[in-house]
Image (tube, grey):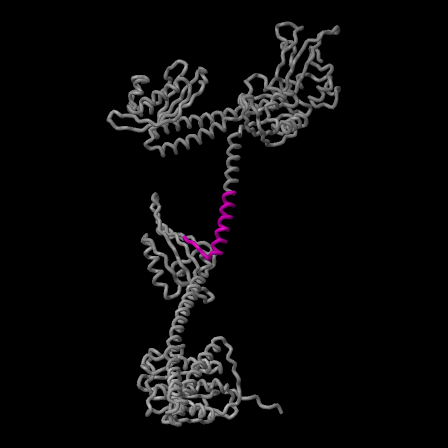
Amino acid sequence: MFGPDEIIQACNPAAVRIFGFSGPEALVGRRLGSLVRAPGESGAKTVRPKPLLGDAGPARVGARTEMTGVRAHGVEFPCEFTVVRLESAEGEAYGAFVRDISDLRRAEAELRKTSADLEQEVKQRTAELTHAVRAFERAQRVSQTGSIELDLLTAEHTKWSQEMYALLEFDPAHGTPTLEAFLGRIHPDDRGRAAHVIDEAWRGRGWEPYDFRVVRSDGSIRWMRGAAHFFTSAVTAHPMLSAALQDITERKTIELELERLMQRLSRAQEVARMGFVDIDRRQHRREWSREMFALFGFSWSPEPPSVEEMLQRVHPDDRDRVRAIIDRSYATGELAGTIEYRLLLPDGTTRWIRNIAEHESGDNDRIMSIYLDITDLKLAQEAEAHRASELAAAVRHLDRTRRRLERAQALARMGDAERDIGTRHRVWSRELFLLHGLDPDREPPTREEFLARLHPEDHGKMAESLREADGGADIPSFEYRVILPSGETRWLRVHSQTTTDPESGVVRVASSTFDITEQKAVEQEMHRLLERERELGRLKADFLHMVTHEYRTPLGIIVSAADILERYRDRLSPDEWRERIRDIRSGALRLAGLMEEVLFLGKAEAGTVPLELHPIDFGALVRDVVREVVATFGSERDIEISVRDVPSGAQADEKLLRHILGNLVSNALKYSKLDQPVRVSVDLEGGHVRLVVRDEGIGIPEADQPRIFEMFRRASNVGTISGTGLGLVVVKRCVELHGGSIGLRSAPGRGTEVTVLIPINLPAPPRP
C-alpha cells in the first residue's frame, strides 16, 4: 500500500519474498519507483497510480501492466503490476499487486520454440509429401500409368491425369472423354467385359484388377491393366472411385518403381502419424494436438478427453500398466521413459502406440509426451520375427536333414558332388572327402590334387572323363581306384549326370560316388569260388577218367589171369602158373598203389596226415625204394644212385619219403626209354637234404609246367603212356608236410630234373 507520494506504507510477506528483502521493514518507506519500472527503462522511475487507472475514475480497478521488477540485489525480473484505489478515511491511498511472471515467460519461450520446431517439422513433412506426389507423377510418366477420379454421387469425372490422356490417345484440350469414347479405345473382344467392370464399379460393388487390350491409332495393340479403389472425398464427403490404367508392356520396371514409391509414401505416412500432449502438473492442465485425437479415435474438441476416457481406449491387457505409469507421472512427475502399448479403438481395430515422455527444461511439473503410431512397425516386427522363426526352423530342419544325409552316406559309403562347368565352383559332401582320404574341413581339392589320389593306372581314364564333362557331355558310370594316405587301395564307382539350366544356361555336373571295395572283394571271391567249382568239376571228370582207364587195365590183367588159371590149370606148367600168379599180384599191387595215392591226397587235403620224424638212413632208403620201383618196370632198367655227406642222424618221415622217391623214380622210368639213363642223387645243400632225380626222357612242355603239380594234370606230350596225374601232387604234398620245397626243370626231348629240399631235423643233444 502506498500514498500519493508513492512511498510504500505497508506490504505483505509475499512482496518481501518477490523483491528479495529480509523483512517488511526493509520495504516500508521506499519509493515504489525504486522497485518497479516500465520495461526497457533504466534507473529509478516514479510510477504514478492515477494514470494507470485511466479516465474511468479512481474507483475502477486498474488493468494489469507488464513491468520490470528490481530485486534487493539488483536483479531484474518480469512481473505483472496492478494498481487499485483504496477507500480510506485517512485520505487517498492505493494498493499495488505484483506477480512474478518469470516462470510464465520461460514457459512461453519454450512454447514458442516448440511451436517453431513443430512448424519446421510440418514444413519438412509437407516438402516430403510434395516430393512424393511429384515423384508419383514422374512415376506415372515413366511407367505409363494413368489415373482417373470419379465422383460416384454426381457421376462426373473430376480428374484425368495427363498420362491417362496419353495412354488412350485423347487430347486434354477437348475435355474429359465420355464413357463411350473410352470404351471405343478398347479392343472389341475385351469391350464387353470392360463395360461390365465399369458398371459394377459405378454401382459401388468393387473393381477387381483385370487386363485388357487397347487399339492405338496406328493399329498397334497395347495391353493395359486396370485397377481401382473406393474412398470418401475429404472435401465433399462424396463416395469417390479412383481408377488407374497401366501399360503392362514393361510391367517389371513399373512394379519396381511403384514399389519404391509406396515405400516412400509409407515412410511419409508413418512420420505424419504423430501426436503430442503438453501436461502442466501445477495447473492440472493438459493440451492435446489434433493428431492426438485421431490416434485415440476421438473427434476433435477444444478440451481433451479425461485421463479415464483416454485409458478406456487402451487395450484391456495393457490398461492397468498404463494407468499405473500415468498415475505415477501425475503424482510425482516421475517418467517411465519410452513405453509401448495397444489401443482398442471404437471400430474394433487395434493400434500400437509408442509413448515418449520428457520433462520440459528439467521442470518435473511440465511434461511433454509424444505419441507415435507404430502399428505398421509392430506388424513388420511380428512378421519379421515369424519369418525369422520359420527361417530358423527351416535351418534346423536342413541341418537335421544334412546330418541324416551325412549319416546315411557314411553308412552307405557314398558321397556326392556338384560342379559348375562355367565357374568351376565345386561342392563336395563330407563322405566324398573321406572316401578319397581328404580332410572334410578343407575346400574341395583341385583337379591335380584329386588325380594325385588315384591309382596310376586310372589317371588317364579319369582325366579324359573330366574333359568330356567340361564339354557338357554325359559320362557313363565307371570304376576307379584311390590310394589312401595309409597306403590302402579302395575301389570306387562314380555315376554322373550333366544338366543345363533352361533359364540361365548354367551347366552343372552332379555325381554320386560309391565305395565298392567290399563288393569287389565279394565279386573276386565269387569268381574264385566259381573257378574252384569249375576246377572241382574238372577234377571229378579227370578222376572218373583216371578210374576208367587206370583201374581198368590192372583189373583186366587180374581177371584175365584168373580166368586162365580157372580154365587151363590142368594144362599149365608150373612156370606158366607162377607167371599168372605174378600178373594177378602185379595188378593188385598197382590197384593198391592207386588207392594209396588217392587216400593219401584225401587225407592231405583234410590235414589229417601226421608227420612222424625218425632218424633216417637216406642212402639205404633210396636204394630200397629204387629197387622196388625198378622191380615193377623189369630188371633190365638200371638207375645210377649217388649219396654223399648226409648225416646219419637226420630225421624225416620215412613213409612220406617213400612216396616222394617212389613217384619221382617211377615217373623218370615211365617217361624214358630203356636205353636212357636215370640218375638219383642225395647230398646236403645248406641246412637241407637235397634229393635230385634226373632223366633224359620226353620232357615237359614249358606251357604245362606251371600247372604240372595240380591234381590230374599231365603233360600234353605223354601220348598213350598211362598215368593218373596224381604222382607229382603226392610228391608236393609230402615235401610241404616236411616244410621243404620242390623245383622242376624240363624241356621237351631233353628230359626232366626234379629237385627236392628237405630240412635237416637233428635230434637235440643229450643234457650233460
Q: 85 or 524: which is nearer to us?
A: 524
Which corner quadrant of the image does residue 193 belong to? top left
Left or right, residue 615 beside residue 643: right
Q: Position of residue 701 (x, y in %)?
A: 32, 80
Residue 706 in view (yes/no): no
Q: Nearer the viewer, residue 591 or 408?
A: 591
Q: Is 409 part of what is drawn in magenta?
A: yes
Comparing 40 with 421, the one in front is 421
Q: Residue at x 46, y 61 (%)?
A: 437
Residue 93: name its quadrant: top right
Relative to 59, is 587 on the left or the right? Answer: left
Task: Give how far across and how far down residue 290 sits, in percent.
Answer: 54, 21
- Say if the magenta span includes residue 404: yes
Residue that extends furthest to the front in the rendered view of this protein: 570
Which quarter of the rendering shows the C terminus?
A: bottom right
280 over 699 or under it: above or below? above
- Closest to the observer, 695 or 209: 695
Q: Residue 258's x, y, as percent?
A: 40, 31
Is 559 placed above or below 275 here? Answer: below
Q: How many marks?
A: 0
Residue 565's place in the image compared with 441, above or below, is: below
Residue 725 visible (yes or no): yes
Q: Looking at the image, which residue sits at the far left?
A: 218
Q: Position of residue 323 (x, y in %)?
A: 64, 26
Q: Which residues are magenta?
A: 393-417
The main secondary structure of the magenta stretch is helix
Please state, as top left, top right, bottom left or bottom right, where the N terminus lies in the image: top right
Q: Is residue 548 left or right of residue 284?
A: left
Could you say which quadrant of the image residue 227 lies in? top left
